[in-house]
Amino acid sequence: MSDTALFPLSEEHKMIRDTARDFAKNEIAPVAAEHDESGEFPQATIKKMGGMGFMGIEVPEEYGGAGMDCLSYVLALEEICKVDAAHGVIMSVNNSLYCHGILKFGTEEQKKQFITPIASGKAIGAYSLTEPMSGSDASNMKSRAKRDGDFYLLNGVKSWVTSGPVADYFVVFMMTDPEKKAKGISAFLVDGKTPGVKRGKKEPKLGIRASATSEIIFEDCKVPAANRLGEEGEGFKIAMTVLDVGRIGIGTQALGIAEAAYEASIAYAKEREAFGQKIGEFQGIGFKIADMKTRIEASRLMVYNAAMAKERSKTTGERFSLQASTAKLFASETAMFCAHAAVQIHGGMGYSRELPIERYFRDAKITEIYEGTSEIQRLVISRAELGLR
Ligand code: CAA
């Protein structure tokens, strides 16, 4: 949200942040509660976000993107998530889980065909890794891709696919050589209109209800071998590399939710009176505000730091898993902490659907679960620090 001494923002950064802030206030805020209530995918606003260049911020202009840096992406996403985390995750998945992997590992043809419609906002992308029996243990998948001449036949069920019911294109991970376990996984780019791609049931969710999540079922889905992303057996590495970027996005989403909960709490604490004074004057409320602010400031530094590490990796090729996982872990726990405190500060009004506070509370929880639970982030961080595998 704000300029910090560690991350002084350029004019370009301020411009994208302010543009996203205005867009979120004028276009998303009026419809956020309605979409949360109905669970209907916000097609109209997502289309407009595409037109604004928000769906492929780091994608070079030649592939339909905005050609900006990772900090620009994070600044814009933070503003969108402050207003609505559901719009935020659709934006995050398009930018990171979908576009980033193809940009990094795709051929020129694949970039033109599979990134351009997504980055320009004409279509929606999705990432299919998780299966009904393998979430955290991602490499333990049952789905199979079998080579058949110039094609692969894809069979299996993917679950918890963000934007699954509406996505036009998918990055899909399937086992091509089960004996090799993680090294037997390959990645494929699949057009959602390909025969054999079926949309499964839409998940009824606690939060981020306007983002559509579903199973995707592949039944003898014939995909050209030219649509394989990377080499055979390289799929798990691609999935993990892409998740490092995705985790920066979810850290940003969590930061946005925490900030929204905090700002609402400040306003309420200054206005609401009890026992003859503003409730903010009670230490019990003031200390909550102080703890929220401290954790938000730390989260913001960690998320921006991860974005800068990702930016540097474009030239150094260095991994930024540690920065991404620490930022995601801390920011998601901050989102839960702040949303919980905001409900408490608002009392009955925090529990009422008349205010967005209870939505922040419901939305915050998913940030501790998807794109790697907090337990998985702790595993990634501790393994890296202890030099373990
Ligand atoms: N970057 C590059 N390579 C990586 C990597 C990374 N971040 N992480 C692991 N690898 C490589 C390893 O180096 C290793 O390769 P080598 O053998 O050549 O060294 C290989 O991948 C296997 O790694 P591990 O032995 O560490 O694998 P593991 O089976 O122990 O699993 C894990 C590691 C961290 C637990 C991983 O499975 C994981 O992150 N699980 C969580 C999955 C997840 O986040 N799922 C969310 C899906 S998306 C979603 O939520 C829905 C949505 O649409 C938003």
Image: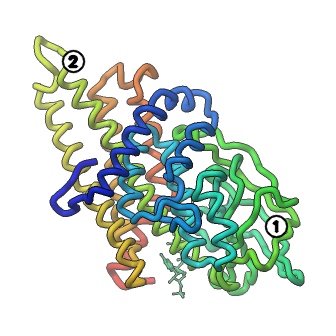
Residue at position x 71%, y 47% in the image: 165
Quadrant in which residue 321 is drawn:
bottom left
Of 143 and 123, which appears nearest the observer? 123
Residue 134: x percent and y percent? Answer: 64, 64
Residue 336 visible in rendering: no
Residue ranking furthest to the top: 276
Drawn side of residue 300 relative to residue 137, left or right: left
Drawn side of residue 271 relative to residue 136, left or right: left
For badge 2, the amino acid type reads Arg
- Count of numbered tags: 2
How much space separates mark 1 and mark 2, taking CA atoms? 57 Å
Residue 330: x percent and y percent? Answer: 32, 57
For badge 1, the amino acid type reads Asn
| Of the image marks 1 and 2, the number of the one nearer the N terminus | 1
Residue 47: x percent and y percent? Answer: 60, 43
* Residue 327 vertical position relative to residue 229 in the rendered view, above or below: above
Q: How has the structure been colored for display? A: rainbow
Graded by Cα atoms within 10 Å as few (under 14), some (14 to 19) or many (20 or more), the crowding at tag 2 reads: few
Is the CB atom of the residue marked by disc 2 within 8 angstroms of ligand 1's nearest atom?
Answer: no
Residue 24: x percent and y percent? Answer: 43, 38
Q: Badge 2 is on which residue?
A: 272
Residue at position x 40%, y 51% in the image: 76
Screen quadrant of the C terminus: bottom left
Residue at position x 88%, y 66% in the image: 220
Of 162 and 55, which appears nearest the observer? 55
Element type where label 2 sits in the image: loop
Q: Which disc is residue 155 wearing?
A: 1
